[in-house]
Amino acid sequence: MRIALAQINPVVGDLQGNADKILACCQKAHALSADLAVFPELSLIGYPPHDLLELSSFVENEQRTRAALARAAPSGLGLILGGVAFNRNRPGKPLHNAAFLYEGGSLLGVAHKALLPTYDVFDERRHFEPGTNRAVIPWRGRALGVHVCEDLWNTVSEAQALYDTDPVAELAAAGADLFINICASPFAVGKRASRETLIAHAAGTHGLPYVFVNQVGANTELIFDGSSCVYGPHGKALLRLQRFEEDLAVWDTADTALEPPVPVNDPIASLHDALIAGIRDYFHKTGIFSKVMIGLSGGIDSAVTCALAVRALGRDRVVGVSMPSQYSSAGSISDAEALANILGLRLHAIPISSLVDAFEDALSEVLAGTEADVTEENIQARARGTILMALSNKFGYLLLSTGNKSEISVGYATLYGDMNGGLCILGDVLKGQVYRLAHYINRGGEIIPENTITKPPSAELRPGQTDQDSLPPYDVLDEVLRRYIEAQQDLREITEATGFDKAVVSKILRQVDRSEYKRRQAAPCLRVTAKAFGDGRRLPVVMRKP
């Protein structure tokens, strides 16, 4: 049997557009003499659909479009599509997340997703009822063990199990001779290796080939890497598809000796490529912006954001704005100009000193008798934010927010100032990673000016200011944040593991907790770790922790 793995980049909700994409893949698979074409989870709808599933007309349209697509597919080609099935055995949620096998327009089998994730960014029990019947689907003399995404994630050991059932093992016991998993598994740095460990374990344990087909592309803050693959019954990879790109490849079940290239294990390279995919798809899939715009301060965060945007969209779709104040150093201004020249961007220079003076004059009577502090500093950030939003409104630009995870974590960002924007590119990227991204971007020659990388980071809101006036060294801050946010360690665990001063760590944790109200008002950020702000980390704004 020849199986086509069709790794597609759907647009959430675009049923007809996604159907056209799927049909084109079917025709290509048929031309390659495939017997079966396999598509990702919720193929027509795109993942995640969220509360679109509460619209009965939308669900009914998905059913009609899927049936029409099955009829339009080339004769002799079987299809496995992800879609929505009605729960006929109420009570329970009204829908199942399902995989459907079609041939010749006829529905030959259905598999309901059994394990419904409700952690991190997932909330599938909001709409779906778990499937309970793990049965193989017989087709052309094979017993297909078809299952959906999370059904794989309980296969290593009882000690690591998230659920009390193992759908893969149950399918093997039911007589499957081939596993097929259709998936929409979001990207996080390092996740592909852990995902393939599960696949290898399932294939090797049961002595059966394993076909894994994943969605690719980005939908709002979630990025999907694709990386679809086939593992043989020996638990070794036989085929791998591209990462972050649409792809289609055919695997013959008789062929167990393929030698796929070993994937390069470079976390910064994968982070770089993921962020480019996130920018590209947010811009194109929303379809409402003419260009993207970045406030270029001469600092590392805006420079990296700008370089990534140019790589994702091309220089003609990127606009830079420099907004120097009386505290901006000559080097920062020249660094922003140098970056724009290297990238070939149009750079608008709009000084803000007169605006800041006007704000201070307007507030002088109310603030009389008070000491200058962060309030006056933030007037500069808010003046810049106002300029950027004015240009966004006038010209239809998407403003990219440039704050990184380290700063956003501890509130080192200004509401209605540098936090303005429609999408935050580095909001899940720690400061140390931003510097590593800059070096990676410069691997073939200078794009980000060397002075931008080597000078001490500074918001430049007062004379001689550096970030370390208010924050611990970034190597300390990043390690504490990684442990607290991503590894979910507490004060004792962090201090014991790192040896950092308890008072320093405690202050950082308090800053993270106290800044939740700011993050609730921030732009969505591209998710690249296992625990990002937003839907991936849900904490109350109003709380008191012991």
Image (tube, rainbow, N blue to C red):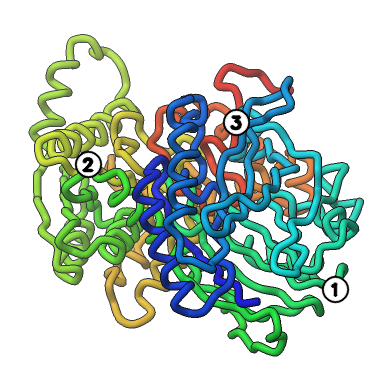
Q: In this view, does 292 lie to the left or right of 165?
A: left
Q: In this view, does 170 lie to the left or right of 143?
A: right
Q: Decide which of tag 2 and tag 1 comes sooner along the chain.
A: 1
Circle 1 SS class: loop
Residue type beneath disc 3? Arg
Q: Residue drawn 59% across and 63% down?
A: 213
How many C-alpha atoms fall within 10 Å of the one at disc 2: few (<14), some, or many (≥20)?
few
Q: Mark 1 points at which residue?
A: 207
Q: Position of residue 369 (x, y in %)?
A: 27, 13
User: Whole-Å distance between the Cαs marked 1 and 3?
Assistant: 40 Å
Viewer-side residue, 146 vs 284: 146
Q: Name the residue under label 2.
A: 288
Label 2 or label 1, whichever lies nearer to me, is: 1
Q: Residue drawn 38% across and 64% down?
A: 24
Residue 388, compared with residue 107, is above or below; it is above
Residue type beneath disc 1? Gly
Task: Classify the position of the N terminus by image quarter.
Answer: bottom right
Q: Where is residue 96 in the image (x, y as percent from the top left)?
A: 65, 36
User: Whole-Å distance between the Cαs marked 2 and 1?
Assistant: 50 Å
Q: Tell me the number on the disc at residue 538.
A: 3
How many C-alpha atoms fall within 10 Å of the one at disc 3: few (<14), some, or many (≥20)?
few
